[in-house]
Each structure stands twice: as C-alpha cells, then as structure tokens.
C-alpha cells in the first residue's frame, strides 16, 4: 500500500515538473478547427485519448471472453440431484396388501 502511494506521488510530481518545463504554446489543427494550448496539456490530452481508445478496443474482446468463461463454467458444473426422498436398497418397499 505504501509503495503504491509513493509511486503515485512520484508520478504526480513528475507530471507537475513536466508541465512546468513544457509550457510553450503549440497550435493543433484538426482540419476543421484549430486550437492553441500549452504543450504539456496537448500531450497529456493526447495520452489520455490514446488510453481511452485502447481500453475501448480491448473491451469487446474481454466481454466475449467473459461470456465464454461463464458458458464453460455452466457446462462444467454437474446437474443437481432431484429433491426426492431416497429409499435404501436394503429394505424393500412395503405394501398395505402384503400384511399377514
């Protein structure tokens, strides 16, 4: 837990230093629109959009895989025994007409 916290704080500090050192304005053109912003912001937004695109591309395969695992687990489980009273094979069934 402490290692994760330390690593998170370290990465946040690196991101802040990166943003402070790369504050030059850059122009980004989308073909139909153009915008200007700090280099660090443009790079971070591009990175985040890339991560989102990767997650969405991977999501379909993961959902198919999950469905297949669920189906295989259902096939693997043995069917439940019926809930009926069991008769022991050592004692034959008694009939009221068989009484002496």
Image (spheres, rainbow, N blue to C red):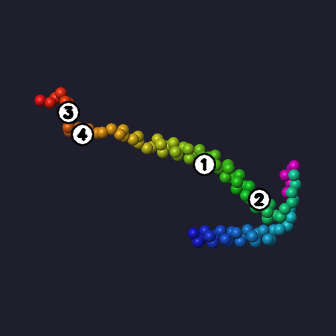
Disc number lying in front (2 or 4): 4
Looking at the rendering, the stretch of residues picked out in magenta corresponds to 28-32
Q: Give the mark, 1 or 4, whose residue is nearer the N terminus.
A: 1
Q: Quadrant of the C terminus?
A: top left
Which of the pair 15/99 is nearer the observer?
Answer: 99
Residue labelled with disc 1: 62
Residue under circle 3? 94
Quadrant where the image shows the N terminus: bottom right
* Mark nearer the viewer, 3 or 2: 3
Q: Is residue 36 left or right of 73 when viewed as pictured?
A: right
Q: Position of residue 28 (x, y in %)?
A: 85, 57
Kindly identify which residue carries mark 2. Answer: 45
Q: Name the residue carrying label 4.
A: 88
Which residue is found at the position 41% from the left and 42% from the top? Answer: 78
Which of discs 4 and 3 lies nearer the camera? The answer is 3
Q: What SS does tag 3 mark?
A: loop
């Amino acid at each position: 837990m402490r290692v994760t916290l330390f690593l998170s704080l370290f990465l946040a500090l690196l991101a802040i230093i990166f943003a402070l050192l790369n504050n030059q304005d850059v122009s980004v053109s989308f073909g139909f629109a153009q915008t200007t912003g700090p280099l660090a912001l443009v790079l971070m937004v591009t990175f985040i959009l890339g991560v989102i695109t990767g997650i969405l591309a991977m999501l379909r395969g993961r959902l198919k895989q999950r469905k297949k695992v669920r189906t295989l687990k259902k096939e693997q489980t043995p069917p439940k025994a019926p809930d009926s009273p069991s008769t022991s094979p050592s004692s034959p069934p008694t009939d009221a007409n068989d009484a002496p």
